[in-house]
Image: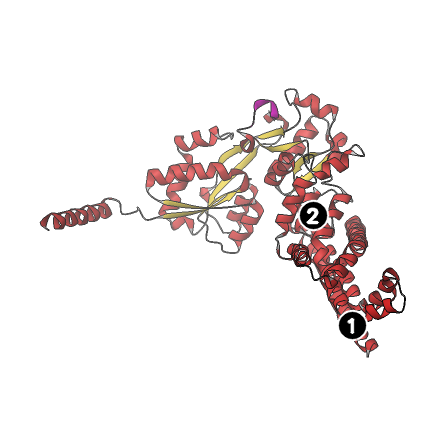
Amino acid sequence: MSCVMGFVRRVAILTVAGLVAFPAAAGEARVAVAANFTATAETLAAGFEAESGNTVSLSFGATGALYAQIAEGAPFDVFLAADTARPERAVAEGLAVKDSLFTYALGRLALYSTSLELADATAVLRDGDFTHIAIADPVTAPYGAAAMDALAGLGLKQALAGKLVTGTNVTQTLQFIKTGNAELGFVALSQVADAPAGDKWRVPENLYRPIRQGAVLTRQGAENPAALGFVDFLKSASARAIIAAAGYGTEG
Amino acid sequence: MEFVAAYWPAISLTLLLSLVTTLVLIVVATPLAWWLARSRSPMAALVAALVTVPLVLPPTVIGFYFLIALGPNGPGGLLAGLWGGRTLAFSFPGLVMGSVVYSLPFMVGPARIGFAGVGRETMETAAGLGARPFIAFFTIAVPLARKGLMAGTILAFAHTVGEFGVVLMIGGNIAGKTKVLSIAIFDAVERLQWQDAHLLALGMVVFAFAVVAATSLIDRRAGEAVR
């Protein structure tokens, strides 16, 4: 009996000590994440949770849709966009904290195919021996705009115009290629990180304008210690290593 | 005027897709509805359920299956191979196939109810008087079921005009080829061209209202004619 009571007392003491030692341990950061960053964000969130004891809840979507949700008062603390235009606009509209904006990842464009050998990708593009090439919407999706840059840079924009099929975002573009409906297409390098080397071609960075993916703290996030901690973590060396391993560049 | 010119490819494509889909559905769904209305076999109950399933499935499910079925590893790819293609996705025939499945319950449902109202005795009397089944179907059953058939035809057409999810998933958004009106509206909203989006959306609302009003008018007229 006394043994049981001793155990209970010890647990009680440890619990109280724990609460005193880690007063911020119960925080939660709510993060809106651009679709292309899904898998990487999950790895980062797990790393941050293990390190800080805070929890991270992730919501994925197209950058434009997430922006619209934040503008309508969605409960997000941090916005990880696929471009810098939407975070900048969030700042301009007073939805986000001005000084918190930074580039957390540089998107890398890749040409990807499940049926064509891409060892000499420019020759494949130039020969045009395919019926469909998939890209993301060049007006609304940053990777789509980069794909059009690359095609223009290779002098193939006109030649391939009739073969373009457009996904609303880079995820749908990958669907078109994975199902074989389009023989090849431009996606994010991070999406095809696990694909065999012959199936993908990393597009040289001088062929397209940089895809700066901007992060910003929302107004409500500025008062959430867990959110501030997550943003700091994103800038840490260990987070940058995870981001680089996933196929993104990092700045600075 | 400039506005109409800019969106005319999407408008005409939408009308053409809806027209072709409706014609295919008239040919396919009419005999199917007749059989479903007459048959008492458990098989008919299963087929009726299968035909109605697209009504409750999210368009993403139909779109996903079609994306695979139309592709090079599916029957669509085999079919496309006959004329040297490799997929039916991103093509007008592919959109028609998706639309036929998607709008099938809207044609079969009302048509079946129309045919169910044609009495078994009526058809037996016709047969007794020497009318061959095929002739009796067109001269007796179809006119008697015209209310259901017309409602089904209008709904199938209108539902195809309003189709979005399936086309989005298998269309590839090619101007003049697979970019229908609903996709054009989606694009305009995404691009923050909200004035265009407003005009197109208003057009859709007016169209939808006209269709629903027309269907209920037909309903009343047909009711009076029977009386």
- Determine the CA span between mark 2 and mark 1: 31 Å
Q: Looking at the image, what colour scheme do you see?
A: secondary structure
| Magenta span includes A222 | no
Q: Earlier in the sequence, mark 2 or mark 1?
A: 2
| Magenta span includes A197 | yes
Q: Position of residue B36 (x, y in %)?
A: 72, 60
Q: Is residue B118 visible?
A: no
Residue drawn at x 64%, y 55% is B53
Residue drawn at x 42%, y 35% is A235
Quadrant showing the C terminus of chain B? bottom right
Residue B217: numbered disc: 1
Count up the numbered dots: 2
Which residue is at the front of the view, B93 or A190? B93
Which residue is at the front of the view, B111 or A48? B111
Residue drawn at x 73%, y 41% is B90
- Residue type at mark 1 is Leu
SS at mark 1 in the image? helix
Quadrant showing the N terminus of chain B? bottom right
In the displayed orientation, state which residue is furthest to the left. A2
In the displayed orientation, state which residue is furthest to the bottom. B227
Rendered view: B85 above or below A10: above
Residue A176: numbered disc: none
SS at mark 2 in the image? helix
- Residue type at mark 2 is Val
Region rendered in magenta: A195-202
Residue B167: numbered disc: 2
Rendered view: A178 above or below B102: above
